[in-house]
Amino acid sequence: MLRIFKRLYGFIWKHKWWFIVSMVATTIAFVLELLTPYFFKLFVETLQRNDLAYLYKLILVFVGVQFTSLIFHNLKYLLGDIVSVDTSIDIRSTIFKYVQDLDFTFHSNKSTGSLISAFKRGDNAFWGLFDRLNRNMWEIVIGFFVMGYFFLKIDPRFIVIFIVSFILTLIATKYLAGYNIRTRVEFNEWEDKISGIITDNLINYETVKLFAREKWELSRLRNTFVDWKKYLWKHFWTYRMIDMSVGSLVNISIFLVLVFSTNLIATSQMSIGDFVLVLGYVNLFFPKLFDLIYGLREISTAYADIKKYFDLLDYEIDVKDPTRPVRVGHVYGEVGFKNLNFAYKNRLKNAINGIDLTIEQGQAVALVGRSGSGKTTMVKLLMRFYDPASGKIAIDGINIKDFTKSDLRSFIGVVPQEPILFNNTVAYNIGYGKSRATIKEIRDAAKIANIDDFILSMPKKYQTQVGERGVKLSGGQKQRLPISLFLTRQQAI
C-alpha cells in the first residue's frame, strides 16, 4: 500500500509549492472554523456577566473570523484544484506514454476493454484520493489537535474517551477496509470482463451482424452479469459492515462525552460556557469522524482502482532502447538477417530458424511460404516489436539494436495486412506518418494510390470522416489509404 501512495505523492510533489500553499490554506481555514465553539463559549460567559459592550466586540471579531475562514476555504479549493488538475494530466500522460512504449507482447495479449476500464477507474480514483487524503483526512488531524487542546484545559478525561474511541474506530476500519479492498479487486475483475465483452462486440459489430449473433452476444453478456452481480453485492455488504460497526463506535463515543459532561455540570466541575464548548465540538468534530469512516471506505475503493492503474507502470519492457544510440541522418536501405532464430513465448517450436538473408539497397524481395512460416514475424523482428533469441539484424551494417526504436521505425515504411484507420478525416489518416504534411503531399500520395478521384467525389473531400476503423469506406478504399500513408513518408526501406 505504501508503494502506491509513494508513487501517488511522487506525482503530486512535482507541483510541491502549489501543494504546500494549498495545505497551509486548508489548515488556516479549518482552524478558524474550529474556533466557532470557543466563540459560543465566550458568548455565553459574556451574557452571564451581562457585558453587552464586550459582546458586540466579540460578535465583530467572530464575523471577521468567519469571513477570513470563507476566504481561506475558497483558496484551499482553488489551489488544490490547480495541483490536482496538473497532477492528473501528469499521471495520465505518464501512464499513456509507458503503455505506448510497452512491448508488442503486452499489446497482443491485452484486453482493450479492461485497459480502458483501468484508465477510467484509475483517473476517477485519483480525484477521490486527492480530495480525501489532502482535505478530509488532514482536517480530521487538525481537528484532533485543536479539540484536544480545549478538552485538555477543561478535563483531561475527555481526551482519554476521545483517544480510546478514535483508536477503536481506526482498528475496526482497518480490518473492514482490508476486506473491502479484497472484494473490490474481485469485483473489478468481473467489471473488466463486462467491459471487454462490450468493447469487443462494438469493435467487431460487423462480424456479429454478418453471422446474426446478436442474441448470442446478449446472452453471453447476461450470463457474465450473473457472477458480476454476485461479486458486486459481496462488495456492497462490506460498506454496510463498515457503516454499522464504526458508526456504532462513534455514537457510543458521543454518548459517553455527553454523559460525562452532564455529570461534570451536575457536580459544578464544569461551567455552562465549557459545556457549550463541548457541545459545539461534539456537533462540529464528531461528524468529522463519520467523514473518517466514509473517507477510509472511499480510500479503500479508490486504492484498489488506482493500484491497477499504477501497476501498468510495473510491466517490464523487454525490447529496450540502447543507452547510447547510434544517430544517422539517413540510411541507404541495405537490410541483413544473419543466423536469425526466434520463438514466441510459450511455444515449443521456433518461428524463425537460422535465417541468413541480405536485401540490397533498392532490391525488391518477396517472402513466400505457407501460413505461420514466419513471414510476418520477420517484419516484426525488423521493426523490433520483438528481439531475436539469437542472431542479428542490421541496416547498412549497423545492428538495429543500436538505434532507438523510434529512429529505426522511421526508416521503414509498412503497409499492414489489415488496414486500421483512425476515426478522423481522410487527410489525417494519409498524413499521419509525417508531421506537418502539406495537402499537396497528401494529394500526391493519394494520386499514386489511385484514390484521389474518389476522395474528391465526396462532399467534404479530404475532410471526410472515415469512421471507426474506416467503416465508411469500402474494403479496397480502406486498403488504399494506408498505401497513401506509406507513400507520404518516403522511407528508404
Image (cartoon, grey):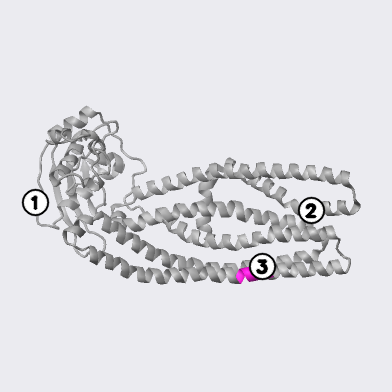
* Nearer to me, 192 or 368: 192
Real-space CA distance between mark 1 and mark 3, rounded to the nearest whole angstrom: 76 Å
The amino acid beneath tag 2 is Phe
- Residue extent of the magenta highlight: 245-251
Label located before the other in sequence (1 or 2) = 2
Q: Which mark is residue 40?
A: 2
Q: Which mark is residue 182?
A: none
Q: Quadrant of residue 480?
A: top left
The amino acid beneath tag 3 is Val
Label located before the other in sequence (2 or 3) = 2
* Nearer to me, 94 or 40: 40
Q: Is residue 66 left or right of residue 188?
A: right
Closer to the camera: disc 2 or disc 3?
2
Q: Is the residue under label 2 in contact with that under label 1 (CB below 8 Å)?
A: no
Secondary structure at numbered mark 2: helix
Q: Residue at x 48, y 55 (%)?
A: 125
The amino acid beneath tag 1 is Val
Secondary structure at numbered mark 1: loop
Label located before the other in sequence (1 or 3) = 3
User: How many C-alpha atoms fall within 10 Å of the one at disc 3: few (<14), some, or many (≥20)?
Assistant: many
Q: Position of residue 4 (x, y in %)?
A: 50, 56
Q: Residue at x 32, y 68 (%)?
A: 222
Real-space CA distance between mark 2 and mark 3, rounded to the nearest whole angstrom: 24 Å
Q: Position of residue 390 (x, y in %)?
A: 23, 54
